[in-house]
Amino acid sequence: MIKLGVHPNFQKKHPPVLAIGGHDPSSGAGIIADAQAILGLGAWPITLISCLTAQNTQQVKQITYQPIEALQLQLEVLLADFTPAAIKLGVLGSLEVQELVAKLIKRYPQTSLVIDPVLASTSGTSFTSDSLIGHLKEEILPYATLITPNLQELEQLVPNKETVESQAQELIKLGCKAVLVTGVHKQTHTVRNLLFTNSTNEPLVNRWQRLEGEFHGSGCTLASAVAALLARGEALPQASVKAQDYTWQSLDKALKLTEGQLLPLRIREDNHA
């Protein structure tokens, strides 16, 4: 009998990456953004939708979470056919979903786990609560290869700490192997991103030219890009830098299709006529 995921005839250039998150109908963020970034960096997206949203590039009007029974069945059927080489988490949104995810990642302890802690939309709609953050930190974060908070998300995850360094180290103390803090919300001429790991005292610093405008789905792009590169065997420091470059390029080519936020273009322009 063939052991799933390891048959010699299976293609190795597109390892499966499981993305779990919400559906954004604008395709700027959420599970479609995840799939675009994962495929764009040479891995194959397999997806599980935690919730449906009524949203566009300007606002989130409504969030409808999937029944847990449906989500459980979708996951089991998917995993009967695929073995994920990496897992990327976005909006989970309910305790039942987080408990399902906690069980999932314990089944794949050697699989890279990247967490994009989407705690609120840019327009201010909350996707979480104090109890969900507590469960995330206790049951999911200790298994993470990387978490990618921006400065606002980091403050929510670790309040009452004086510095970014102390906040990141607090997450690492919980068991997370690395924290990539993005500086997109700090109004400076350049964006400074900091990668903290459990193996070094000083963060790896990457600076990027700040682009004009507001972007819809930059965090999804970054975390999914890292997950894809880890699935392909890249070491975390190199995957972090390459994913940041891919994200910057996607934002630099972003499309202005509405009056709202810009939409990252996660595919190469020369793929189009």
Image: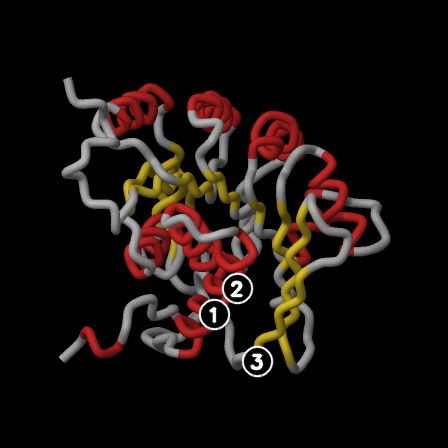
Mark 3 or mark 1, which is nearer the start of the sequence?
3
Say whether residue 145 is visible.
yes
Helix, strand or loop status at disc 3 = strand
**Res 159 quadrant in image:** top right
* CA distance separating discs 2 and 3: 14 Å
Quick one: SS at disc 1?
helix
Between 213 and 167, the one lying in front of the other is: 167
Q: Is the C terminus in the top left, top right, bottom left or bottom right quadrant?
A: bottom left
Q: Position of residue 32 (x, y in %)?
A: 31, 53
Q: Is residue 269 left or right of residue 19?
A: left
Q: How many marks?
A: 3
Tell me which residue sits at (46%, 62%) in the image.
243
Question: Is 191 located above or below residue 82 in the figure?
Answer: below
Q: Is residue 20 left or right of residue 167?
A: left
CB contact under 8 Å: marks 2 and 1: yes
Query: Which residue is painted at 58% across and 46% down in the image?
Result: 147
Q: Residues within 10 Å of mark 1 (few under 14, many from 20)?
A: some
Identify the residue shown where x is 42% and y is 74%.
Answer: 249
The residue singled out by tag 3 in the image is 209
Q: Nearer the viewer, mark 1 or mark 3?
A: 1
Mark 2 vs mark 3: which is more N-terminal? 3
Check the image and report above or below for 123 versus 48: below
Using the image, tell me which numbered label, if any, was put on residue 142: none
* Amino acid type, residue under disc 1 in the picture: Asp
Do residues under tags 1 and 3 come within 8 Å of each other at their CB atoms? no
User: Does the image show residue 61?
Assistant: no
Q: Residues within 10 Å of mark 3 (few under 14, many from 20)?
A: few
Reading the image, the residue beneath label 1 is: 245
